[in-house]
């Protein structure tokens, strides 16, 4: 089964306003945070996806990223 990350409609500013984070809880049993960082000079963007298991049992997933 394929489940896509949707995130929340409103992001949170982090890192002095250079990074936006959006979160989704309970995605395939995991809490997922996507962070997008753009430095002040705007030269690049870095995406970081953090998957956290809030439960006591192991969760196994296959992650597919595309851009």
Image (spheres, helix red, strand yellow):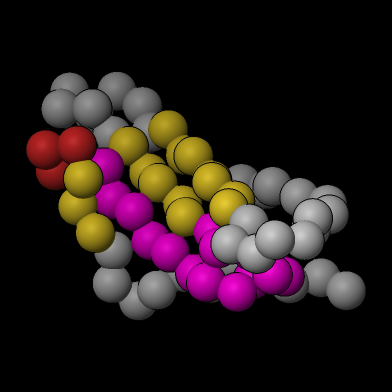
Q: Nearer the viewer, residue 33 or 18?
A: 33
Q: Residue 54: x, y in percent? A: 58, 62
Q: Residue 13: x, y in percent? A: 19, 52
> Is residue 34 part of the magenta span, yes or no?
no
Q: In the rendered view, would you say 59 is above or below 7? A: above
Q: How many marks?
A: 0
| Residue at image location 19% in from the left, 37% down from the top | 15
Residue 21 horizontal side relative to residue 56, left or right: left
| Residue at image location 40% in from the left, 46% down from the top | 35
Q: Residue 40: x, y in percent? A: 15, 27
Q: In the rendered view, would you say 51 is above or below 57? A: above
Query: Range of the magenta residues?
Result: 18-32
Residue 4 seen by the camera: no
Farthest residue, direction left: 16
- Judged by its main secondary structure, the magenta piece is strand
Q: Which of 55 and 50 is in front in this view?
A: 55
């Amino acid at each position: 089964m394929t489940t896509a990350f949707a995130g929340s409609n409103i992001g949170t500013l982090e890192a002095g306003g250079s990074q936006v984070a959006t979160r989704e809880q309970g995605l395939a049993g995991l809490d997922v945070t996507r962070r997008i960082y753009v430095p002040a000079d705007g030269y690049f963007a870095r995406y970081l996806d953090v998957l956290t298991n809030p439960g006591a049992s192991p969760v196994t997933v296959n992650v597919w990223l595309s851009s």
